[in-house]
Amino acid sequence: MEQHNQGRKIVAQNRKAFFDYFVEERYEAGIELYGTEVKSIRKGAVNLKDSYCSVEKGELIASGIHISPYEQGNIFNRNPLRDRRLLMHKKEIMRLQGLVSQKGLTLVPLSMYFSGSRVKVEIGLCRGKKLYDKREAIAKKDADREIEKRMKNRSEKGGEE
């Protein structure tokens, strides 16, 4: 597993997904891109917010991934919000389709990264959070921030004496 993480350069993360969903399982998929899109991704011009995946005609499709047009791309630039095909084994796609249809789970892109020279997408099999779960997450975050702040103030006062 160590060699797999070697050479991984994260380009974009979908933080909103971790707020809106509980991530049950994670998968790695390749993504079908054009050259100007890859160049744009290298610059970090990617937004995964509000993106999702679906299985259509036996293929895994990612929708809502915004890849900004490449500045020097001129006529070769594609629509920034076009649907893109994700590349996984047929068995994995069929398994995911079954889980999504039966258990009411959702497929959400969690991050996009370079593995060597190839662009990969980490997909999460997610269960939606209820409103009270989100409130709980916000309260925990605020409490952690408050504790951190007090610890910082305490250490600063301790250094002066």
Image (tube, rainbow, N blue to C red):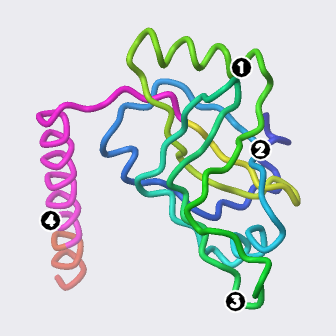
Magenta part, dominant SS = helix
Q: What residue does disc 2 label?
A: 30
Q: What residue does disc 1 label?
A: 92
Q: What residue does disc 4 label?
A: 150
Asked whether 112 or 104 is in front, the reply is: 104
User: CA gap, disc 4 to disc 3?
Assistant: 46 Å
In what element is the residue under mark 4? Answer: helix
Q: What residue does disc 3 label?
A: 71
In what element is the residue under mark 2? Answer: strand
Question: In the picture provided, is 25 more to the left or to the right than 79?
Answer: left
Q: Earlier in the sequence, mark 4 or mark 1?
A: 1
User: CA gap, disc 4 to disc 2?
Assistant: 44 Å
Residue 159 horizontal/vertical position (percent): 24, 80
Extent of the magenta region: 124-152
Q: In the rendered view, would you say 119 is above or below 154?
A: above
Question: In the picture provided, is 93 more to the left or to the right than 20?
Answer: right
The type of residue carrying mark 4 is: Arg
Of badges 4 and 2, the one in the foreground is 2
The type of residue carrying mark 3 is: Glu
Of badges 2 and 3, the one in the foreground is 3
Name the residue at 79% across, 77% down: 76
User: CA gap, disc 3 to disc 1?
Assistant: 36 Å
Kindly indicate whether the residue at mark 1 contacts the one at mark 3 (C-beta within 8 angstroms).
Answer: no
In what element is the residue under mark 3? Answer: loop
Name the residue at 59% across, 45% down: 62
